[in-house]
Image (cartoon, rainbow, N blue to C red):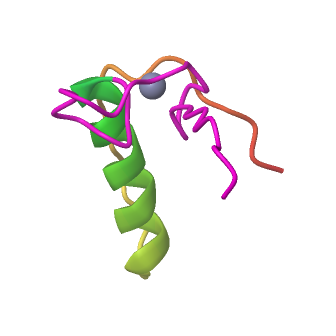
Amino acid sequence: MDKKVNRLICPVCKAAIIKEGNNYFPFCSPRCKDTDLYHWLTGKYKISSPLKVEDEEDEEEDLS
Ligand SMILES: [Zn+2]
């Protein structure tokens, strides 16, 4: 049986994360968890009119 080293990274900021004792798994921080949730929600629910969201998110990733 292979012993795999689970190298986990945060899907939002790509930082290395540890599963054990991490309340925000699979994210590295509550901020990343919120960020991912935001992306998930905005991708899930199609809103017919532009939704202006103003928050402290300042590191927009270019998802082209
Ligand atoms: Zn992160």
State yes or no: residue 21 in magenta.
yes
State yes or no: residue 59 in magenta.
no
Side of 16 relative to 24 (left or right): right
Of 52 and 12, the residue lying toward us: 12
Q: Is residue 19 visible?
A: yes
Residue drawn at the location 69% of the way across and 52% of the way down:
2
Residue 46 percent location from the top left of the image: 44, 81
For this orientation, the residue located farthest to the front is: 1
| Magenta residues (range) | 1-28
| Number of numbered discs overlaid on the protein picture | 0
Residue 47 higher or lower than 7, as above or below: below
Residue drawn at the location 48% of the way across and 17% of the way down:
58
Residue drawn at the location 54% of the way across and 20% of the way down:
16
Residue drawn at the location 53% of the way across and 35% of the way down:
12
For this orientation, the residue located farthest to the right is: 64
Residue 15 percent location from the top left of the image: 56, 19
Q: Quadrant of residue 1?
A: bottom right
Residue 53 percent location from the top left of the image: 33, 43
Main structural element of the magenta stretch: helix, strand or loop?
A: loop
Of 55 and 43, the residue lying toward us: 43
Residue 47 higher or lower than 29, as above or below: below
Q: Quadrant of ligand 1?
A: top left
